[in-house]
């Protein structure tokens, strides 16, 4: 009978430890993913901004040397990421492939213009800079028109500001929830040992002596949970980097290492603090209060 009771207690203890590790791992995993999002939010927004194309249309009278000189000066500018010269023949082929028919069969000639597609660096994709760049280009007497989607640029910048605010806000809320969830799991684990704590206290053990094994046990559980969370984060990061290589998620490995270290440290810190205060609470309770 005693043996059966001991086995039952061990199973309950293992189940309690498993639930603590699982809750710690899941919470830290989600918190780590949110950290990845915060770290790479600017990269993602920059990637989309740099897809905006400024098209400089050239007059038919533009000389090749003038076109080459403009393209070279743009490529050397601080605000330009890349440039691409598109001849009217290339533009016609693109339209033919897109529409599935040759429009020149109807008009009898190619009405399109030679152009230069300019991709700007993300920091310069705003209405003021685009207007300035457009004005500089139009000052060239061989430039006919500069085209870009100003409404899209304004919408994109507004959305980036909103998303950045909400990401930071949700990160703060989620961090608080993570601490509360882990703290709750630890408190439940310590609660199951409240009579053991009080018995040790009654035979003369000091609070520090009683608290130490509980803290170390919880820290070990926190380390296991953090390691599981980091393994999950590694798989997600590997998958995202393979799927979206253009985002360059691993271009700055030091930031990823710091994030992993932060998640690991949180696993230890939160469990240590939670266990410290949980055991302190039961140490301060009177014996008759343990039943409530």
Image (cartoon, rainbow, N blue to C red):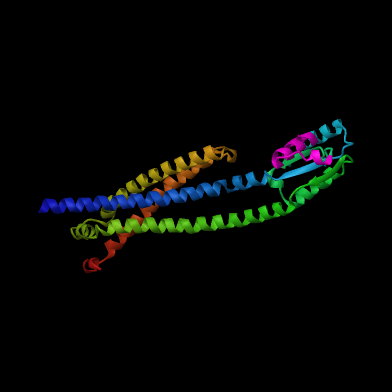
- Which quadrant, please, contains the C terminus? bottom left
Picture quadrant of residue 251 = top right
Q: Is residue 61 left or right of residue 239?
A: right
Horizontal side of 210 relative to 134 (left or right) equals left
Q: Position of residue 55 (x, y in %)?
A: 77, 43
Instruction: Name which residue lies at 72% across and 46% down.
Output: 124
In terms of depth relative to the viewer, which is nearer, 170 or 236? 236
Q: Is residue 98 magenta?
A: yes
Judge by depth and name the residue closer to the eye, 2 or 142: 142
- Residue furthest front as drawn: 106
Using the image, determine if residue 87 lies above or below residue 261: above
Q: Position of residue 198 (x, y in %)?
A: 22, 60
Q: Position of residue 249 (x, y in %)?
A: 55, 40
Query: Is residue 29 covered in magenta?
Result: no
Whether 57 is drawn above or below 188: the answer is above
* Segment colored magenta: 80-107
Regarding residue 77, the answer to whether it shows in the image is: no
The x and y percentages for residue 136 are 83, 44
The residue located at (82%, 38%) in the rendering is: 110
Q: Residue at x 84, y 38 (%)?
A: 108
Quarter residue 274 falls in = bottom left
């Amino acid at each position: 009978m005693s043996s059966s009771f001991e086995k039952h207690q061990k199973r309950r203890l293992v189940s309690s430890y498993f639930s603590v590790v699982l809750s710690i791992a899941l919470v830290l995993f989600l918190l780590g993913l949110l950290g990845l999002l915060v770290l790479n939010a600017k990269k993602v927004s920059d990637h989309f901004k740099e897809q905006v194309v400024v098209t400089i249309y050239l007059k038919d009278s533009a000389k090749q040397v003038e076109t080459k000189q403009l393209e070279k000066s743009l490529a050397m500018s601080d605000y330009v990421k890349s440039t691409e010269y598109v001849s009217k023949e290339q533009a016609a082929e693109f339209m033919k492939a897109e529409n599935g028919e040759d429009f020149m069969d109807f008009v009898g000639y190619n009405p399109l213009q030679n152009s230069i597609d300019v991709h700007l660096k993300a920091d310069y994709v705003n209405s003021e800079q685009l207007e300035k760049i457009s004005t500089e280009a139009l000052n060239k007497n061989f430039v006919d028109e500069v085209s870009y989607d100003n409404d899209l640029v304004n919408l994109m910048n507004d959305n980036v500001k909103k998303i950045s605010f909400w990401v930071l806000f949700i990160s703060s809320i989620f961090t608080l929830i993570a601490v509360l969830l882990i703290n709750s799991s630890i408190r439940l684990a310590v609660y199951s040992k409240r009579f053991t704590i009080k018995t040790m206290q009654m035979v003369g053990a000091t609070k520090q002596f009683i608290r130490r094994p509980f803290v170390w046990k919880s820290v070990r559980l926190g380390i296991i949970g953090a390691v599981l969370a980091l393994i999950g984060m590694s798989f997600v990061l590997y998958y995202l980097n393979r799927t979206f290589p253009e985002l360059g998620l691993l271009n700055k490995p030091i930031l990823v290492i710091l994030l992993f270290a932060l998640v690991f440290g949180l696993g230890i810190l939160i469990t240590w603090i939670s266990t410290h205060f949980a055991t302190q609470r039961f140490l301060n309770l009177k014996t008759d209060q343990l039943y409530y």
